[in-house]
Each structure stands twice: as structure tokens, then as C-alpha cells.
Image (cartoon, rainbow, N blue to C red):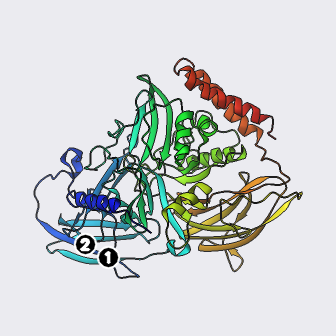
Amino acid sequence: MKHPVRSRIILCGLLSVLATHQLLPAHKLSGEELPQRILPTQNFRVDLIDADTGKPIPARVYLRNSDGKSFFVKSASAKGSALPYREQWVAMANSVEKHTTVSAHPFQLDLPSGKYVIEIERGKEYVAFRDKFEITDKSIDRKIRLKRWIDLSKRGWHSGETHVHRRMEELPNVMLAEDLNVAFPVTFWTVASDQAPSLQPSTLRGQGLSPFGPRVDRGHKPIYVDRDHVIFPRNTEYEIFSVNGKSHVLGAVFILNHRNRFLKTMPPVASIAKQAHQEGALLDLDKHSWPWSIMLVPVAGVDLFELSNNSIWRTKFGFNKAPPSPPPWANLESDSDNTLTEWGWINYGFEMYYALLNCGFRITPTAGTASGVHPVPLGYSRVYVHTGEQFDSKEWLAGLKQGRSFVTTGPMLFAKIDGKLPGKSFSNTDQESKTLNVSIESVSEKPIDRIEILVNGKVVKTLQPQVNGITRNAKSVQFDEKVTIARTSWVAIRSIELQPDGRKRFAHTAPWHVPLRGESIKPEKSQVQYFIDLMKAEVVRNRTVLNADSLSEFEFALSFYRKLLNQAQ
């Protein structure tokens, strides 16, 4: 792989900046981080080692005392970096993410006497480390070994995420700490319909500890942190919360890996989407629940759907507002007060994605965290793309668009249908039916509860791990199954893992597309009618707010879904 000289010069500059930003900026400190009084301290120092290679590795570090107060460690090396992070979801006082990402150097902190808990994680492929220790009258010098439970690169899979709000200067540190192969940081951003995207921080930025100011445009060429970790640096988010200076929410959409800066305001959307696609960029639907999301799909030709989005966190789930009118075909899990549980929110996204696939849209799944403005580590949910054992950034982009991928918040999922990876569109056949050979392997750090095979959004087979004929939880399962379809369909597979606290983590493949008899896929009437109702409501809501060109896009989407209803079953 060639590494442009320009990219390497930029990277050296980024690492230099990182090395000087190890302390919390004063204006970001909360009361619990402010020292109450000067106490005697002892040095706590850790060398973090990969258990298999014996080499130092970067990671994410949590450090708290017995009162729950968080501490942010520092690098013990002049060549190292330690980047503190604190984000809190404004509506949830308990949904706070506090950690430090450290480079592959020792880290340390002077601590007053007392009892502490340290937790260390590195992305999705290492066993999390947790231990208690006590500071007394002596310093502590420890060597901690992190052990891989799986190595996806050896299987040809490499990870990325498409909704990133970390600054460019932060990414060399954070991507390596999380072992995230690909990142698309938001470079240009706007929250108003009458303002083109700019480099300035959004007024909606959270309370994070990033010491960096405005975003920086590094051009469109990829920046290589090393051979296996790459930043695609030019990405734009339109996140419209006001129209002509007045509060009016439309939603968000990302334009990923474009060449030229977008100077147009949005809405309307179509001409911007056309330019994006002409440049080879990808359009990523931020969330299915935004008012304009179902319009964007037919009007903008959306490429990606965030099957795990920025409301899936390591900390307590905070986005539990139920949709105003939930999909009638979906049975969404909710609490006693009719608010969505985390699993209800996840299934809401699943069901909307399935309905769009049933409408014939070839959208592939991705994942995004909004780390940088949300209380979540970078890459906490991520998409793995198959590129072969040797990482290749162009091949990764092609695989993401094609759907040679799976999305995960925890378990790993390797599946083939008739020997083909996800994203495969099979040749048409005149047969009345087709039997598919489905091979599945799922591996997880925690026990797997079940594997589900879906056809057109319906679970057609539920597979549960068995040991000696008895259903039991297992961390590695394999199945070979046959599934017969009688009409043009899409097929996908998901793996569900249970956490000790009752939360669920999942992996979900991109779909395989299987045409029969030259027929198009037939959508479900209830799903199309739901989209029609959403668009009718949006036309009414926007009629006195949007100009004629912008309103016409909602009217076009309404007409599109009405025509589709004639093909529904």
C-alpha cells in the first residue's frame, strides 16, 4: 500500500499536537474533577502489554475511586499521548462516559490513598480487564496483559464506523486505542437550512474534553495512521434543526468521502446528493426516526443505513422516547411508562430497515456512534467489512457499499449463503422456489443466546446453541441450515448475545438478494402505508415552512410510496 508523503507529514503533525494535550482544559472541568484539597499522593503506573505478542498496546482506560469519582490518567512517556474524554447525554444525568485513550506507552497518575477500580478495554476483540487496587503509602508499578478473544484481521475482516465527531488531531490516538481500522470524521457541519456546512464547531457540541477547536479540512486524500488504520478526512453532515432562522427539525444525513466542499444549503436535497454520488461519495442515513428520513431514501438515493446508531452506548441507555406513532407491524419492547427500552429502540431501527429493503431499496447497513458529542467510545458499535487478510482502504470502501459486511455491538458473525458473503446479489432463476444453503458461525466474548435467519424481515429460523442435545449458552456456535424461498427475497442473519445485566448486544449481516422469475420484491402493504402516512404528515407540517422546491421533495416521496402501494401484498 502506498502512503502519500503529504499524509505522513500531516500524521506527524497530528501526533505532535496530541503529545502536548494530556491535561484537561480548565473550562471543561466539572466539580468532581476539581481538587478539593491537597492530599498526599502515590504514583500509580501501568505498562499495558498484548498477552500474545508481548508488545505494548494502546487502549481505553477507566479509573474510579470507591466514591465513583473518575480520574484521567496521563502518559508516562514524552513520546506518548493520553486523551481524556467526558460526554454526558443532556437528558440523562447517569449517562456519562469518562475515559482516557492512551497510546502504546506506559501511563500513570498520582493518586491519594484509597480504594480504586481500573477497567481497560481495546475495541471489540480484546477481553476487557477489570481489577481493584488500593493506594496506601507506596507507589504501584504494574504490568497488565490484555488478551485477544478473536482476531478479525486474520479472517479478512476490518472495522470502521461512519458517524464520528472526534477531531482530526484526536484520531491517531483514539483509532489505535480502539483498533478501529477506518474512520470518517465530520469535517463540515451545519444545523441550519440557511447556512452552508462550515468548519466551526456546532452550537450543539456536548461537554467533551477535546482540547481542540474548529475542525480542520485536510483535503480529500486518505490519511494513514499506519498501514491498517486510515482516516477518510472529508465528510459533511447536514443536521437541520432550523429553517430560515426558526426552529424546525428535519434531521441529519452524512456525505462520506467526497472530493469537493459543499457550498449549497439544504434542503432541497436532490442536487447535493447528485453531486455527492458523482464524486463517488456515500450518503449515510443518520437515524431512521428523523422527520425527513423516509423522504431522503427515494429522493437522495441513500447508500447506508445506521443499523446501530448514535443512541447505542456503553453507559446507560438514554434515548428512550417512543416514536409518536410506532410501526403497526413492529412489537417494540417498552417500559411500564411506555418509553422504549434499549432493545425496543434497536428493534425500531431493524424494522424500519427491513421495511425499506422490502420496498426495493438496496441500502447496506453501517454503524456510527457520534463519539465526540455523545457519551460513547469511538467504535463502540462498528461495521466489519471483508477485504481479505491484507487491509486495503479502496477495497474496504467498495465492500461497505456492496454490503460485504456485518454490523456489531458485541458478537462476531460470519455467514455465507451458497458459499457467498453478505451483499451478494444472486442471478435470477425461473424456478418456482429456491433452496439456499446457509452456513453460520458466531463467536462472542459472552454467551450467545440465539441466531436468527430472516427472510424479508421475518424470522424464519431461530437457532439456539446446544451441548449434548441440551440448549445452553455458548461463546462459539456453528450451524448449517437450508432455507427455501418461493418469491424474490432478501435474506439476513443476526446473532444476539445476553449481558449479565440483562442488556442485549447483537451482530447483523448485510442482506443477500435472491431474485426469482424476474420479479421485483413485493413490499408489505402495512409497511408502505406507514411510509405514506409519515410523508402525508410531513407535507402538511412543512407546507408553510419550506420553499416550493424543498416541499416538492416530500411530495415526490409521497407519490413514490403511493405508487409502490399498488405493488404491495
> Furthest residue to the top?
544
Q: Nearer the viewer, residue 487 or 506?
A: 487
Identify the residue position indicated by label 1 in the image. Answer: 56
Residue 309 point in image, percent of width and height: 51, 49
Name the image quarter holding residue 14: bottom left
Residue 458 point in image, percent of width and height: 73, 52
Is the Cβ of the residue at disc 1 closer than 8 Å to that at disc 2?
A: yes
Q: Nearer the viewer, residue 89 or 519?
A: 519
Q: Amino acid at mark 2?
A: Pro
Identify the residue position indicated by label 2 in the image. Answer: 106
Q: Amino acid at mark 1?
A: Pro
Position of 471 with respect to 489 (left or right) is left
Q: Nearer the viewer, residue 32 or 400?
A: 400
Pick the quarter of the image with the C terminus. top right
How many discs appear?
2
Residue 506 seen in this snapshot: no
Residue 160 point in image, percent of width and height: 48, 59
Residue at image x 31%, y 48%? 208
Disc nearer the start of the sequence (1/2)? 1
Pick the quarter of the image with the N terminus. bottom left
The image shows residue 268, relative to residue 543, as above or below, that is below
